[in-house]
Image: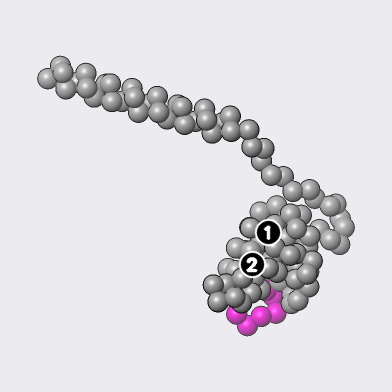
Amino acid sequence: MAGMMMTRIVVLFLALMLVSVAENQAASSGTPDFQPQRQGNSQQYGTTPGSLHPQDCSPKCTHRCSETAYKKPCMFFCQKCCAKCLCVPAGTYGNKQTCPCYNNWKTKRGGPKCP
């Protein structure tokens, strides 16, 4: 009975050590967090690559998808693209050249992924 208890304690100790080592490696990886630069009140805010913060995607996509008859899929893909590219082209249609990442992301069939 005592041997079983000692084995459990050793296993628990080893598990805690592994978690501690993993946390230390993650904390000291040396990769700084990406912080896109805001461009003030400029008209280009949100339309150039990396100019949005993730929390800014929803309002930009709401405007982008405001005139489509397919709002749910438009919002889904717009937010997915915005989260990856951190930009949404201006207007409700077109202007994709202002955000190359958004423009160049394609579906498996080769069509545009982002609305």
Give the residue type at disc 2: Trp
Give the residue type at disc 1: Cys
- Identify the residue under disc 1: 85
Q: Position of residue 69 (x, y in %)?
A: 63, 83
Q: Which residues are magenta?
A: 65-74
Q: From what the image shows, is residue 34 above or below residue 76?
A: above
Which residue reaches farthest left?
A: 1
Residue at 47%, 31% in the rendered image? 22
Whether residue 44 sits left or right of residue 112 in the image: it is: right
> Is label 2 in a helix, a strand or a loop?
loop
Residue 105, labelled with which disc? 2
Q: Position of residue 21 (x, y in %)?
A: 46, 27
Residue at 54%, 33% in the rendered image? 26
Q: CA distance from mark 1 to mark 2?
A: 9 Å
Q: Quadrant of residue 86?
A: bottom right
The kind of secondary structure the magenta stretch mainly shows is loop
Q: Are dots 1 and 2 in contact, CB under 8 Å?
A: yes
Can you see residue 91?
no
Q: Specify whether residue 71 is painted magenta.
A: yes
The color scheme shown is one colour
Whether residue 12 sits left or right of residue 49 in the image: it is: left
Q: Position of residue 107 (x, y in %)?
A: 57, 72
